[in-house]
Image (cartoon, rainbow, N blue to C red):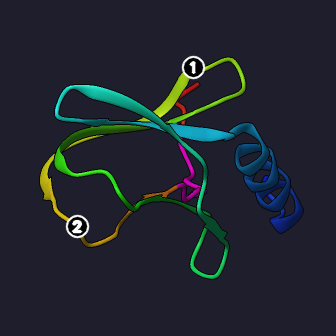
Amino acid sequence: MSEIQPLMIDLVQQFLSNLVVGAKVTIDGVVYDKEIYHTSTKYGLRKYVKLSMEQGIVTRAALVDSYGRELYVKTMSYQKGAQGYVIAFPLQLEVKEVKVNE
């Protein structure tokens, strides 16, 4: 019987966390480059992107790596006003056993 160890999950989460360097958020058809506002590991890995002054309809947000490649894309339709808004990206890992018939 094989079992993935907690260390492996921790290392993969660290890799994912380090891979994400920013976000691209589309508001009223304009793409904004945004920094990662906060990273949390309290309930699994989560990345947060904060919108402050931007206003309009938020239709898309994507986490990106250092090459600008989109790693995680969310589509939405949120009317962003003068209040701040935070977009959460949960990057949770699960271990599932898969049985293969041999």
Picture disc at residue 38: none
Residue under numbered circle 2: 82
* Residues marked 2 and 1 touching at CB (< 8 Å): no
| Quarter residue 88 falls in | bottom left
Few, some or many residues within 10 Å of mark 2 (<14, 14–19, 20+): few
Q: Is residue 40 above or below residue 87?
A: below
Q: Residue at x 26, y 72 (%)?
A: 83
Residue under numbered circle 1: 69
Q: Is residue 42 above or below residue 86?
A: below
Q: Residue at x 71, y 45 (%)?
A: 16
Mark closest to the chain's N terminus, 2 or 1: 1
Residue 60 in magenta stretch: no
What stretch of residues is rendered in magenta? 91-99
Q: Indicate left or right for 9 with 32 as reference.
A: right
Q: CA distance from mark 2 to mark 1?
A: 30 Å
Residue 22: % across, % down:
61, 41
Quarter the C terminus occupies:
top right
Considering the numbered disc 2 on the image, is that residue within a helix, a strand or a loop?
A: loop
Few, some or many residues within 10 Å of mark 1 (<14, 14–19, 20+): few
Q: Amino acid at mark 2?
A: Ala
Considering the numbered disc 1 on the image, is that residue within a helix, a strand or a loop?
A: loop
Q: Is residue 99 above or below residue 31?
A: below
Q: Residue at x 62, y 67 (%)?
A: 38
Q: Indicate left or right for 55 with 51 as reference.
A: left
Q: Amino acid at mark 1?
A: Arg
Q: Is residue 95 above or below residue 25?
A: below
Type of secondary structure dominating the magenta stretch: loop
Residue 99: % across, % down:
53, 41
Q: Is residue 3 visible?
A: no
**Closer to the eye: label 2 or 1:** 2
Q: Is residue 72 visible?
A: yes
